[in-house]
Amino acid sequence: RVSALVLRRLSAILMWILSNAWFEILYRDRESVLAWEQGLCFVPTSEIIAVEETDLNKKQRNSGKWQKMAKLHAFTVYYVKKAQNHRWRCSDVTFWCVDEQLCNQWIQALKELLELQTRPKQLLVYINPYGGKRQGKRIYEQKVAPLFSLASISTDVFVTERANHAKDNLFEVNINKYDGVVCVGGDGMFSEVMHGLIGRMQKDSGIDQNNPKAPLVQCNIRIGIIPAGSTDCVCYSTVGISDPVTSALHIILGDSQPLDVSSVHHNNTFLKYTVSLLGYGFYGDVLKDSEKKRWMGPMRYDYSGFKTFLSHHCYEGTISFQPAKHTLGSPRDKDSCRTGCHICRQSEQQLAEQRKKCGLKHEEDEEEWKVIKGKFLAINAVNMSCACPRSPKGLSPAAHLADGSADLILVRKCSRFDFLRYLVRHTNQDDQFDFSFVDVYRVKSFQFTSKLLEDNESDVTDIGKKHFGQFCRDHPACCCNIANSTWNCDGETLDSSAIEVRVHCQLMKLFARGIEENHKEAVSNQSRVEQLL
Ligand SMILES: CCCCCCCCCCCCC/C=C/[C@@H](O)[C@H](CO)NC(=O)CCCCCCCCCCCCCCC
Ligand SMILES: Nc1ncnc2c1ncn2[C@@H]1O[C@H](COP(=O)(O)OP(=O)(O)OP(=O)(O)O)[C@@H](O)[C@H]1O
Ligand SMILES: [Ca+2]
């Protein structure tokens, strides 16, 4: 290790000398490293976007410079430049020399290196022209398509004409032709594409989605998200920023991030899949109200949020859940899920071992269920942190993208002021779970039944109890809503007062790599390693 360090230092000095001369390319282990005039700069081949021959002589002729010089030959390397806050940009550098053969050799060598990377070559793209601020088409055409063409990616592009157009289309297309599916839109559009892909996978494998216990088939075709929606929570939580160019570059490099998906059932009927927020009470009511105000664009959430906050409805019901014992993490952890997360890796292995051991036995049924009854302002189940521009740390900052668990957050009945304090903590660094009225559990499955439904089911003959007004008749001071709330399932409303939810570990994959450690954190970790050496 010490000699590797010394070698690296030596090669750095050598590169500095070379960078003042013509161009040079050095190899460090099997990774190529480029050095150029501006001083030292390392670019791993995995972060080179494209290599192109450059007609430098044409440029020079036009500018009138270099006229007395010999004919030059050049190539341009396009690479990922990492900026602040997880933002990526496409940068380029041109290398030149007088020897045409040498120049061609470098172009050839770099292209061969790029060929060795497993990157998407053919993509299927769905654009929702009405998501967010209705900029999806413009964003794709101006910011994304030029990058795909630079990276020699061919695309089949569909601009959707109605809701569920993309989902329906995914059941018909020749899916094996593609290396991935890209959706341009928000969380709702992503959800549509995910339902299409997972549904298609199960259909092709003869799996019945209505069976809540069916082991679902993993979906290996990756989805790329170009954010053009109102919340863009899935993109933000998996990339660290909601930025179309950054996401396009993650797709081009062929990044891969597995993702947990939860299935939602009612009475052996499949309802939906969810990857981000499945929320009852506050977030369900915000969504339901905001759907009527779509014309307001992303602002609709603030308007409906404020209205719902003032209405302060709570809902009574029973939640039963199975704690996620296979994972090392806890929702109160200080560390968050980051690129290459060891908790996600360990949890996946643990689940695979459990499955091997138990074979076809439904061991899950035998595991303990915890039951909680109460009155809640919000019941939020999140498969990931749910970070988004409105809430940069998310609803559960320590939730993991791919650990086979969800965080179940129960916000019990409390005063408006306390609920506001809780909401404000979505937006700052303070601990959201440090309230007497908030409980959080890491679970692998859960069920919810509203009190209204329980009452109706337990006494179907009592017609009086079927009327909503009955519910709080015995408690005149109670703020509980007389009707049920709805579920906010990744931004889609779901009307069911009884649901069964099960987390499927790493059911699908995204063109992403999780949130990378901050540069500062990474540098301090690196210097710690060097001190150790
Ligand atoms: C006082 C400041 C409080 C600010 C609270 C900000 C909370 C932001 C939480 C965002 C959580 C996102 C979870 C992701 C959900 C997505 O799958 C889904 C589809 O895109 N988006 C929403 O449902 C969109 C949900 C958007 C909900 C916005 C709620 C805004 C509440 C405003 C309350 C104001 C009270 C002011 C009282 C003086
Ligand atoms: N051509 C279309 N016309 C109408 N609706 C569409 C069309 N294409 C897709 N949709 C639907 O629009 C809904 C919302 O789209 P999308 O998620 O892109 O934007 P958003 O709701 O503004 O953003 P977010 O989900 O991030 O809050 C999706 O549920 C999708 O099914
Ligand atoms: Ca998870």
Image (tube, grey):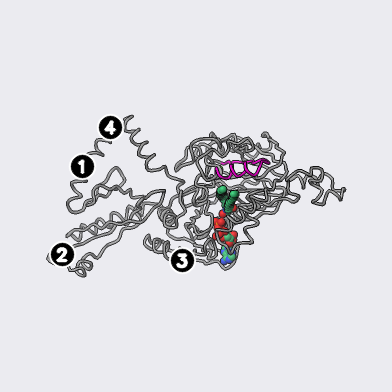
Q: CA distance from mark 2 to mark 1?
A: 30 Å
Q: Residue furthest top?
A: 532
Mark sitting earlier along the chain (3/2): 2
Q: CA distance from mark 2 to mark 4?
A: 46 Å
Q: CA distance from mark 3 to mark 1?
A: 46 Å
Residue designated by label 2:
66
Name the kind of residue labelled 1 in the image. Answer: Ile
- How packed mark 2 is, by other alpha carbons closer than 10 Å (few <14, some 14-19, many 20 or more), is few
Q: Is 83 in front, or is 152?
A: 83
Circle 3 sits in a helix, a strand or a loop, which is it?
helix
Q: Position of residue 416 (x, y in %)?
A: 64, 44
Q: Which residues are magenta?
A: 404-425
Mark sitting earlier along the chain (4/1): 4
Residue designated by label 4:
2
Q: CA distance from mark 4 to mark 3?
A: 51 Å
- In the picture, which quadrant includes the C terminus? top left
Kindly tell me whether residue 357 is visible in this rendering.
yes
Mark sitting earlier along the chain (3/1): 1
Q: CA distance from mark 4 to mark 1?
A: 17 Å
Mark sitting earlier along the chain (4/3): 4
Kindly tell me whether residue 193 is visible in this rendering.
no
Q: In the rendered view, tell whether residue 23 sits above or below residue 336.
A: below
Q: Is 481 in front, or is 196?
A: 481
Left or right position of 295 against 454: left
Mark sitting earlier along the chain (2/4): 4
Give residue 138's mark.
3
Q: Residue furthest bottom?
A: 62
Reply yes or no: does residue 512 show up in magenta: no
Q: In the rendered view, tell whether residue 25 sits above or below residue 11.
A: below
Residue designated by label 1:
13
Name the kind of residue labelled 3 in the image. Answer: Arg
